[in-house]
Image (cartoon, helix red, strand yellow):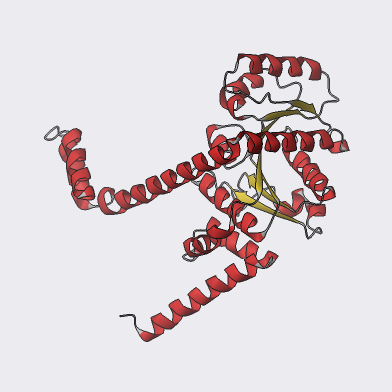
Amino acid sequence: MFHPALKNTLTRQGGVTMEIVDKLLNHSRLALSKAITAVENEYDDAVKIMTEIYPHTGNAYVIGITGPPGAGKSTLTDKLAKEYRKRGKTVGIVAIDPTSPYSGGAILGDRIRMMDLMADEGIFVRSMATRGSLGGLSQKAGDAVKLMDAFGMDVVIVETVGVGQSEVDIVKTADTTMVVVIPGMGDDIQAIKAGVLEIGDLFTINKADREGTDKLNIEIEMMLELNPEHVGWRPPINRTVASKGEGIEAVVDSIEAHKAYLIDSGRLAEIRKARIKNEVTAMLNDRVNRYIDKEVVSTDEFDALVVQMQNREIEPYSVVDDIVGKVLK
């Protein structure tokens, strides 16, 4: 039995959690902000919030935007959000930012990057800090997307900081993924080819008023020709000058065309099913890893086993078998 004081505290916490959920589902921006903060910082009520809002998710269309630093992804995201607003859609933005070494918060905070969007009630922008590592952030970004979805956003855009494997994992939360590149990247196009080409549903050459745009367009076309992944959908290549608002309508048209293709072909349901499977697998792995770290790796008994292995008194294979046997019994 709980101590009465503790029981009252837990009741109050549960009440606050449900209040946040209720207000979020009734389109309270403050409640949405609090819920994302709870998820990002792994507060005790985060899981409860996600459990309650989950039945209300699955309605928003999610767009992932990735590309190398300096490609103008933030400016492009800003313009895309405004174009969707012109088309009567509400927009949520999850912007993954590098971390300030001083505060631990996002350097490129949403107030700095997308100040003019904040005045629009139909747009909600949230920066999520990497805190020096993108590991585990893909799940938090996915949860932020779900919260914006439950809030009622029609479109949610996830924008990453680069094109590494962790960023690729983050944009896998998307229905449509756009790869942004710029002329003059040189050998960087090869890095993009290795890491992102297979997940790009459309490509955008930003800063297309620069020299080298035609050459870059041809390179992407050649890489697409060699890529067997795209069956039934040929990723379009759009050109934009996001700083001037040029080419934005065509990009949104391409996104909408890809959405229509996914729905008509039945691929959207397949993508979302695979995403749920991956999410649950990642959650299971995380839960098991935390348990093993706490109950096995952090114990004096394990340290003693390590010493024995170091002295070659025992070998690691039997040790692992014994530990797994005990954990799974």
Residue 168, how many percent across, how many down?
57, 35
Up-down relation of residue 188 to residue 92 (above or below): above
Name which residue lies at 78% across and 27% down: 238
Residue at coordinates 44% horizontally, 83% vertically from top-left? 8
Instruction: Please identify the quadrant where the N terminus is shown.
Output: bottom left
Q: In this orientation, which residue lies closer to the viewer: 256 or 163?
A: 256
Figure check: 175 above or below 216: below
**Residue shown at the point (63%, 54%) measured from the top left:** 149
Q: Residue furthest bottom?
A: 4
- Residue 134 visible (yes or no): no
The residue positioned farthest toward the left in the image shown: 313
The answer, for residue 108, to whether it is visible in the render is: yes
288 left or right, relative to 74: left
Q: Quadrant of residue 53?
A: bottom right
Q: Is residue 137 shown above or below 29?
A: above
Hey, which quadrant is residue 120 in on the image?
bottom right
Q: In the displayed structure, does residue 147 sit left or right of residue 275?
A: right
Which residue corresponds to the image point at 66% horizontal and 26% vertical from the top-left?
A: 233
